[in-house]
Image: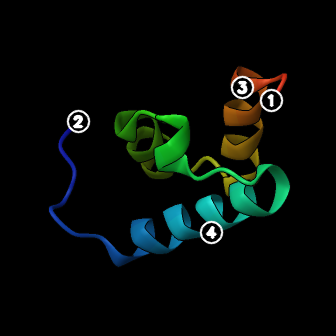
């Protein structure tokens, strides 16, 4: 699937996800090395920030 070059909705969704990761785990999306394609596909499939956060944190537990 191709995605638009810029989507402000995605930018806000990603920022919300990043803020929640920082609040809960003290690490950013970039620091965790989360694949951008995962984020894009979840956003455009309509997956919530909370569900994506669970998916990411399940993959990084236990956190150091």
Is the residue under label 1 in contact with that under label 4 (CB below 8 Å)? Answer: no
How far separated are the C-alphas under marks 4 and 1? Answer: 23 Å
Camera-near label (4 vs 1) is 1
Q: SS class of the residue under badge 3?
A: helix
Q: Of tags 4 and 3, which is closer to the observer?
A: 3
In the image, residue 54 sits, relative to residue 28, either above or below, namely above
Residue placed under numbered mark 3 in the picture: 60
Report the residue at 67% width, 67% height from top: 19
Give how far across and how far down residue 4 sits, in percent. 18, 60
Q: Quadrant of residue 51?
A: top right
Give the distance between the C-alpha atoms of the residues marked 4 and 2, in whole angstroms. 23 Å
- Whether tag 4 and tag 3 are in contact, CB under 8 A, the answer is no
The mark that comes first in sequence, 2 or 1, is: 2
Label 3 near label 2: C-beta < 8 Å?
no
Does 13 appear above or below 39?
below
Q: Nearer the viewer, mark 1 or mark 3?
A: 1
| Residue occupying image coordinates x 70% and y 31% | 55
Question: Hey, which quadrant is residue 36 in on the image?
Answer: top left
Q: CA distance from mark 4 to mark 3?
A: 19 Å
- Give the mark, 2 or 3, whose residue is nearer the N terminus: 2
Give residue 24's quadrant in the image.
bottom right
x 79%, y 49%: residue: 25
The dot on residue 16 is: 4
Q: What number is the disc on residue 35?
A: none
Q: Earlier in the sequence, mark 4 or mark 1?
A: 4
């Amino acid at each position: 699937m191709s995605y638009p070059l810029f989507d402000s909705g995605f930018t806000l969704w990603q920022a919300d996800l990043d803020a929640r990761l920082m609040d809960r785990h003290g690490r950013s999306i970039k620091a965790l090395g989360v694949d951008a394609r995962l984020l894009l596909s979840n956003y455009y499939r309509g997956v919530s920030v909370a569900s994506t956060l669970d998916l990411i944190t399940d993959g990084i537990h236990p956190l150091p």
